[in-house]
Image: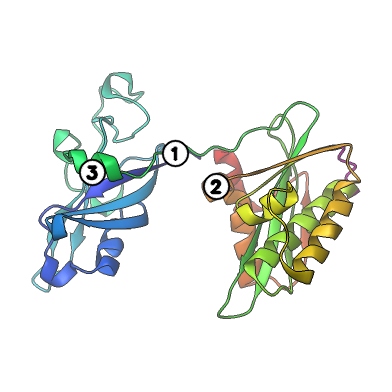
Amino acid sequence: MSYVQVWIQLPDLDLDGWGTEEAVQIIASLAGQSIAVDFWGGGDVIRVCIEVDVNQPLVTGVEVEDGEGGIWQSFGYEVSRFCFDCGRLDHKREHCPNHPCRRRNRGSTNTSTYGSHNLAPRREEQYKRQAPIHYFFWHRPAAGWVKLNFDGSFKGRTGRAGGGGVLKGADGSFIAAFVAPLEMSSALMVGIGALQNGLRLALKLNVKRISIEGDNKITVEMLTGKREPKGEEESSVMSYTRQLLEGFEETMARHEFREANRSTDHLANIVAEAADASMEWHHHPPHSLLPFLLHD
């Protein structure tokens, strides 16, 4: 999957009925995952930073219920260009694989074809505060290496926690996956527990060189020595984690954003929400994981 952060504008939004940050985020969520809201100029321009998949068509707007039959709220994208044929960000119109066919947007949230009217002007002040744009990909490990992606999920309200992970080879092929419920006291400890489970599975499969990626930056920094554990509990679990690492010939670890770690995020949430037993899959992934693996 390839995700990008962009700012969208919500022109002429009724501030009396939809002027709260929460309401704005609800509307913008139809276009993508909401990250930040900016009431620029005291609310003259309402901007939302969202995360969208560049492989999917942009949403041009949404029908907003106003108690009188609904109104159309359009979205203006603060981008330099996108394809006016298919609505995707990753190419221009002249390079569109669907050209010259005209496609409409996905779902019931759109009513018009794409064009320059979907672009929003970017002022100098907006340029200064625009969120950095990042593309997120899952990267294959080097030849002879196996990559472990891991993640933990801690549901504070229910107290349930679990972790999951995926092992894949240098050609991107699936090797194994796992999920396991965990009894940990925090999201950080759950992430470390998921990492330990992944390392034990890799050792069981006789992996020699392992590349580790996780979206919990603190865990990765403690693993690489950039951050010292705090307290006896963190020190103890990290000491055991380093003992596991000694079982490999070579290791490396790096932080990765959640958008490039979606397979394990999916597994961790499954076990934290419902699963009561540990499970492993070898050679053939669980059905629910397939869409995530196919987009890596």
| 4, 73: nearer the viewer | 4
CA distance separating discs 3 and 1 = 18 Å
Amino acid type of disc 1?
His
Residue stretch rendered in magenta on the structure: 204-209
Front position among marks 3 and 1? 3
Residue 65 in percent (x, y) is at 17, 68
Q: Is residue 204 left or right of residue 289?
A: right
- Whichever of callouts 3 and 2 sits on the residue coming sooner in the sequence is 3
Residue 221 in percent (x, y) is at 67, 50
What secondary structure predominates along the stretch shown in magenta?
loop
Query: In this figure, which residue is indicated by the disc labeled 1?
Result: 134
Q: Residues within 10 Å of mark 1 (few under 14, many from 20)?
A: few
Task: Kindly tell me whether residue 241 is visible in this rendering.
Answer: yes
Q: Which mark is residue 126?
A: 3
Q: Secondary structure at mark 1?
A: loop
- Whichever of callouts 1 and 2 sits on the residue coming sooner in the sequence is 1
Amino acid type of disc 3?
Gln
Q: Which mark is residue 257?
A: 2
Amino acid type of disc 2?
Phe
Q: Is residue 280 left or right of residue 137?
A: right
